Image: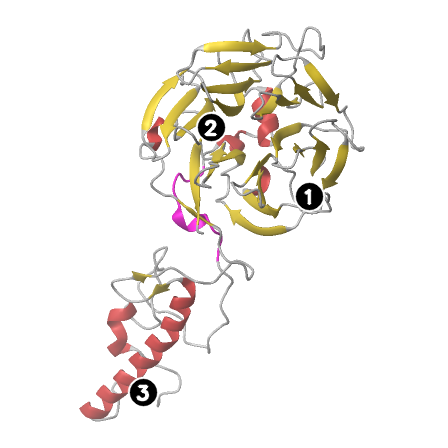
Amino acid sequence: MPAQERRELGVDSPVARLPAPRRSAERCLGAPPRPPRAAPEPPPRGPGPARRGEQRPPGRGGAGGAAATWLPWQPARPPGGGSGRGPGAAMAGTLLALLALLGGSQVRGAARGFVPGPPVLKAEHSLPWKGEQQMYKLDIGWPKTPEHFTGQTFCVAVDSVHGLVYVGQRGDNVPKVLVFSEEGNFLHSWNDTVEMPHGIFVWNTAIGSSVWITDVGTGKYGHTVKQYSPLGKLMQVLGTPGNAGSSLIPLQFDQPAELFVDETGEIYVVDGDGGMNNRLLKLTDDYKEMWLTGTNGSGIGQFRIPHSVTVDAFGRVWVADRGNKRIQVFDKVTGEWLGSWSGCFSEDGPYSVRFTADYKYLIVAQLNINRLAILAAPPVGSIGDCVMVHSVQLADETKPHLVDVDMRSGAVYVAEIGAQQVQKYVPLS
């Protein structure tokens, strides 16, 4: 595995490349809180462990073996296994035992989202995460043909105007850019002059759209920020292809991680993903430097692997300072440092930052703990510290890397390195 990919995964072991299960509708919103323990009951005596998603009531033979059930509060059986009672009493005792078993197990089953007994009836649980209402649900039907994911999916970008989703993936002999419709239909792919995509962004104007990609490869196309047409025609190259550097004239990058292009055409680039540079650049629409901030370090305005960048509706630039486990905020016009968030990232640093369509929340991917954190956006004039209002816990080894948000529908798309897929989460309200 190339050094760049090992740094993304955070480890050098090949285990990090093992894909997670491709589909699990149960994983998207986390597990509900454990319900209170019911009154003690006898252990199961069924023929083997219950299948995943199934609960069997105690007693011999599962739900179908209630007639052979024996409960500790019933009179002891006489020798030979007989009941010592007449047929009517035996039937009455059996019915009472069955009612007791079903009553207790249905309470437990309902709390877990299912009711026991064949056939298994599944119901959606209504227990919110930590008292909060669920905000997103997984669209298990997106994409319709996931077999097109043939490499490690590092980045995703949404064209909200034209209803398109672009996915950047890495690997030998695989298409580097996949294009889907927002409904999940695969449309086409392209590969020319893309070596190792890291970040991707769609920029729409009144006359058309373009796709920007940061390339962290070490070959003849690497260390660049490139602009493509929607069909993959190369339109612009920033940086010196194949040569890492820190120069501003000519402009050079060393493993640029991601970029954001605002409506004026001004470009914000975080450079780099483990290379010699740890900086945030703002470029004019004709690709000249407007301002630059950042050196390697943990002080105010310094970075250790600036990994993602976004701009809110109020003139603030937000940077995922991954190695320092914080988000730093800067003034869009001057580059002045405005504040930072670190309180939400003690477990893992932020890998990706994107605002929701209403700019009320910030979606942050945390790769090493397989989580999407949903943070409350601060009011204008204040940064304060982060407040996590919700989270989406993904399956182990999913490794969410970068995300994007459809600014029209509010859907969140997550590029997952470990699972080698992109998943779509839709807002519930």
User: Which residue is labeled 1 in the image?
Assistant: 380
Q: Residue 232: where, in percent of width, then height?
A: 42, 14
Disc ID at residue 211: none
Which of disc 2 and disc 3 is earlier in sequence?
Answer: 3
Give the residue displayed 45% in from the left and 40% down from the top. 411
User: Which residue is labeled 2 in the image?
Assistant: 153
Secondary-structure class at tag 1: loop
Q: Can you say which quadrant of the picture contains the N terminus?
A: top right
The span shown in magenta is 20-31
Q: Residue 131: where, in percent of width, then height?
A: 55, 62
User: Which residue is labeled 3 in the image?
Assistant: 77
Secondary-structure class at tag 2: strand
Residue 259 occupies which quadrant of the picture? top right
Give the residue displayed 52% in from the left and 58% down from the top. 129
Q: Nearer the viewer, residue 93 or 213?
A: 213
Q: Residue 409: where, in percent of width, then height?
A: 43, 40
How far apart marks 1 and 2 lie (CA) works out to 35 Å
Looking at the image, residue 8 sits to the left or right of residue 177; the answer is right
Q: Nearer the viewer, residue 302 or 111?
A: 302
Give the residue displayed 43% in from the left and 62% down from the top. 126
Answer yes or no: is residue 80 visible: no
- The answer to whether the residues at label 3 and label 2 have Cβ atoms under 8 Å apart is no
